[in-house]
Image (cartoon, coloured by chain):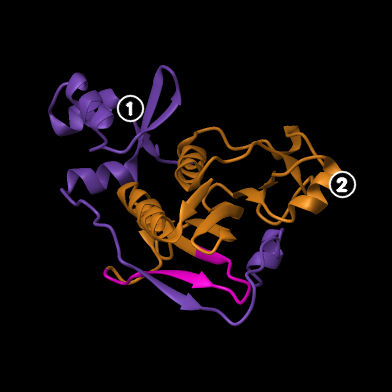
Chain colours: A purple, B orange
C-alpha cells in the first residue's frame, strides 16, 4: 500500500490549521475520534478525520426490536470462504 | 457484561454511532433504525456491517460487529457471543475476534475466545488463533480500526495457533 490510513495529531493540526495541543484537546474531549495504539502514539483514522473536518456529527439511531424465527448462529463460517460464498 | 434490555438498546446505538464517527459507512439507509433481533429462546442479537470509505466502489475494507446477548433474568441480558471482523481486500487479509461455542473451546483448547487471521484472504495457516477477550463492542470497534490503520500487515503465521 499505498496511502496512509491515519494522521498523527501533528498532521491533523496542520490540516486544521490549529496547534497540536488543540488537536489533543479535541481527542481528549471525544470530539475527534482517535486510537491510542501505545501510551505515546495516537492515530486518527483518515475516514474519522474526514467526518470531523466536514463538520458531520453522526447522530444516534433509533433501535427497533424484531422477532426472528430461529436462534442466532455464531461460529458458522469460521473461514472467509464459508462466510462469504463466491 | 450485563445490561438491562433498554441499556442494551442504548449500547447498540452507541456502538453504531462510534463506527460512524470513525467514518465507517454502515450498510443501512442514513436514517434507518438499528435492529435488535429476539430469537425464540429469548436471546437478543445484532449485526452492524459497514465499509471504510477508500474512494473505491465497491469499498475494499469491510467491518462487521455481531453480538448475541442471552437472558439472565427476564429484564437483564449478558453478552454471550461476539464476532468482530475486518476484511481488508486492499491489503489482502482478514482478522476476526470471536467468542462463541465457549464450552467446546474450553474443552478443546482451554480458552473462551479465539481469533482468526487469513493472509491472503481465504488462506489460514491456523483454524483458530489464541486471543484476548474483548471487554465490549467499543473495544472491538477500536481493535478493528487499529488493525485497519496499522501500516504493518498481520503476520498470521507468527500467531499462536490453538488448532
Q: Place residue A35 in its image quadrant.
A: top left
Q: Chain of mark 2?
A: B
- Above or below, comparing residue A86 to residue B8 in the picture: below
Q: Position of residue B49 (x, y in %)?
A: 47, 62
Q: Place residue B7 in its image quadrant.
A: bottom left
Q: Position of residue B75 (x, y in %)?
A: 49, 61
**In the rendered image, which residue does mark 2 sit on?**
B108
- Above or below, comparing residue B74 to residue B61 in the picture: below
Q: Dot 1: few (<14), some (14–19), or many (≥20) neighbours within 10 Å? A: some
Residue B103 in the figure: left or right of residue A66: right
Residue A57 in the figure: left or right of residue B45: left
Residue at figure coordinates x 45%, y 40% from the top left: B142
Does the magenta portion include B122?
Answer: no
**In the rendered image, which residue does mark 1 sit on?**
A8
SS category of the residue bearing label 1: loop
Q: Position of residue B5 (x, y in %)?
A: 44, 61
SS category of the residue bearing label 2: helix
- On residue B53, the disc is none
Amino acid at each position: 500500500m499505498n496511502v496512509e490510513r491515519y494522521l498523527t495529531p501533528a498532521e491533523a493540526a496542520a490540516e486544521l490549521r490549529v496547534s497540536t495541543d488543540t488537536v489533543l484537546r479535541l481527542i481528549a474531549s471525544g470530539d475527534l475520534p482517535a486510537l491510542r495504539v501505545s501510551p505515546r502514539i495516537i492515530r486518527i483514522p483518515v475516514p474519522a478525520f474526514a467526518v470531523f473536518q466536514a463538520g458531520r456529527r453522526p447522530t444516534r439511531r433509533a433501535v427497533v426490536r424484531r422477532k426472528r424465527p430461529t436462534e442466532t448462529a455464531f461460529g458458522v463460517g469460521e473461514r472467509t470462504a464459508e462466510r462469504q460464498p463466491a | 457484561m450485563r445490561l438491562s434490555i433498554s441499556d442494551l438498546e442504548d449500547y447498540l446505538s452507541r456502538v453504531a454511532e462510534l463506527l460512524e464517527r470513525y467514518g465507517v459507512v454502515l450498510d443501512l439507509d442514513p436514517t434507518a433504525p438499528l435492529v435488535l433481533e429476539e430469537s425464540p429462546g429469548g436471546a437478543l442479537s445484532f449485526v452492524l456491517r459497514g465499509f471504510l470509505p477508500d474512494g473505491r466502489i465497491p469499498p475494499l475494507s469491510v467491518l462487521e460487529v455481531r453480538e448475541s446477548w442471552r437472558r439472565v433474568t427476564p429484564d437483564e441480558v449478558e453478552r454471550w457471543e461476539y464476532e468482530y471482523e475486518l476484511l481488508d481486500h486492499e491489503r489482502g487479509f482478514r482478522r476476526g475476534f470471536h467468542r462463541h461455542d465457549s464450552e467446546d473451546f474450553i474443552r478443546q483448547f482451554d480458552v473462551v475466545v479465539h481469533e482468526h487471521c487469513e493472509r491472503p484472504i481465504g488462506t489460514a495457516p491456523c483454524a483458530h488463533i489464541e486471543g484476548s477477550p474483548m471487554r465490549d463492542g467499543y473495544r472491538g470497534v477500536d481493535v478493528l480500526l487499529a488493525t485497519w490503520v496499522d501500516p504493518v500487515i498481520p503476520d498470521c503465521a507468527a500467531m499462536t495457533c490453538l488448532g
